[in-house]
Image (cartoon, helix red, strand yellow):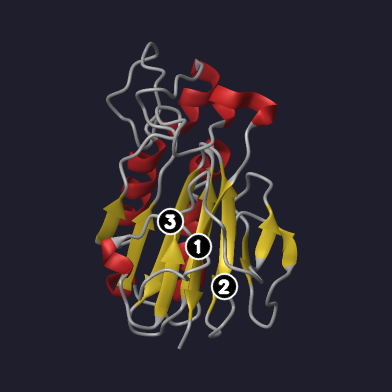
Amino acid sequence: MKANPAMMAAIEAPNLSFAWLEHGFGLRDSTPPPALTTVKQIHSARVLDACGRKGEQIGEGDAIISAEPGVAIAVRTADCVPILIADSRTRMIACVHAGWRGTAANIVGATIREMQSRGSRAEDLSVAIGPSIGSCCYEVGPDVAQHFQAWRPDATALDVRLDLPAINEAQLREAGVRQIWKSGECTYCRPDRFYSFRREKEQAGRMLSFVNRVA
């Protein structure tokens, strides 16, 4: 289903085009739908359940799951990786905010495990990885890069550019997910489309990406 008309200028993932689903990766000029359920993002691997919590900030964490129709869930990003997940069989949905700390803690793997504990199967999951800072622009120090050796076995100490979307994709594949789409757009490279904390510092706004089971 097309994203909610209120979500103007949002990016839609082709692998999430289910009739029972609304979704969108927000741009800097997007207007989000009303009554979104969110979390206080803390760069963790904590996954919260939004059941019965429509239009609330439900606690501290960086991923939200829901199996309830009409509970639209969302995360805010400005360089971190937004990830939307839909189960084609159970219609459970999830959204994930994966910064470098959350990625290092494998938050997307934790989200998949939480969904599996509620009846999902990896082979039924479709996952969309939205715009984030790309490896072209994301240079980090060795103290950060060392957290990713498990997913960058060929990297050297001098290789300090991180590809967070690719690492999250690798973690999804480790969890058994195969239906994965990536936007490929870099938030730092496109000031006309995206906010970027690395580019704009404290002046950066946030894009809001959401997923909603409508039936």
Q: Position of residue 61 (x, y in %)?
A: 66, 56
Query: Mark 2 or mark 3: which comes first in sequence?
Result: 3
Q: Does dot 3 land on a helix, a strand or a loop?
A: loop
- Any mark on residue 72, and which? 2
Q: Are marks 1 and 3 in contact (CB under 8 Å)?
A: yes
What is the quadrant of the C terminus in the image? bottom left
Looking at the image, is mark 2 or mark 3 nearer the viewer?
3
- Disc 1 marks which amino acid? Met
- Disc 2 marks which amino acid? Ala
Q: Residue at x 63, y 57 (%)?
A: 46
Residue designated by label 3: 10
Residue designated by label 1: 7
Q: Position of residue 78 (x, y in %)?
A: 55, 39
What is the quadrant of the N terminus in the image? bottom left
Q: Does 70 appear above or below 60?
A: below
Distance from the alpha carbon under mark 2 to that under mark 3: 15 Å
User: Pointer 3: residues within 10 angstroms few (<14), some, or many (20+)?
Assistant: many
For residue 130, side relative to residue 100 (left or right): left
Q: Does dot 2 land on a helix, a strand or a loop?
A: loop
Query: Mark 2 or mark 1: which comes first in sequence?
Result: 1
